Image (tube, rainbow, N blue to C red):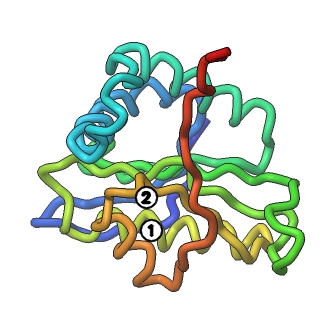
Amino acid sequence: MRASCHSSETMGGALVEVVRLYRERLDELEPLWASLYEHQEPLTPHLVNRARSLQDSWRYRRALERRWLEEEPESFALGADLGGQLVGYAFVRILSAEVATSWSVSNPHADLATLSVLPELRGRGIGRRLMEAVYGELRRLGISDLTINVITTNSDAARFYERDGAVPFVTVFLQRVPSDSG
């Protein structure tokens, strides 16, 4: 199955293509997942006692993304391909569910489940190019709203999304259920 090209541009003389990724290429995302995992680790010291190992995290994520592509026909993954190597990817879920009852949000809506770029190439426009391709695909699907989860302490990511008009919406807290003390 051939990946469809969304856009291409040269980076230092090499061609970067944003391509549609299918299940057959999900295993190629492991280095990108690892770089995201390693990027988030120092941002979340308050969650150190909850962290899965990198191997368990990848195994779980790969299974999730495979299931999403199988069970959610409009969900999609895009990769930034540089000379045959994936150097970034975006995974977007298309969900038919209410996000909010007090505010107008499209149904279905999109959820950016993952955006990752190899650390040595961050800040060179690859994430921006992936997001532009995501927006193009969402426009093609007629979807007008996108939810994005960002680790609370990842202020660089928050600024990245805010530049395109994303605004804080819901804060999610994580808590263990207290033991029965009495």
> Where is residue 12 drawn, in percent x and y?
10, 66
Task: Give yes or no for contact between labels 2 and 1 (Cβ–Cβ under 8 Å).
Answer: yes
Helix, strand or loop under label 2: strand
Label ID, residue 103 = none
Residue holding disc 2: 18
Residue at the (41%, 57%) spot, across then down: 152
Q: CA distance from mark 2 to mark 1?
A: 5 Å
What is the three-letter code of the residue carrying label 1?
Answer: Ser
Q: Can you tell which quarter of the image residue 1 is in?
A: top right
Residue at image mark 1: 7
Q: Position of residue 146 (x, y in %)?
A: 65, 68
Q: Is residue 89 above or below residue 147?
A: above
Identify which amino acid the numbered label 2 is placed on: Val
Look at the image and tell me whether residue 85 can be seen. Answer: no
Residue 41 x, y percent position in the rendering: 26, 37
Helix, strand or loop under label 1: strand
Q: Residue at x 37, y 24 (%)?
A: 51
Residue nearest the viewer, comparing 176 with 153: 176
- Circle 1 packing at 10 Å, graded few (<14), some (14-19), many (20+), is some
- Quadrant of res 155: bottom left
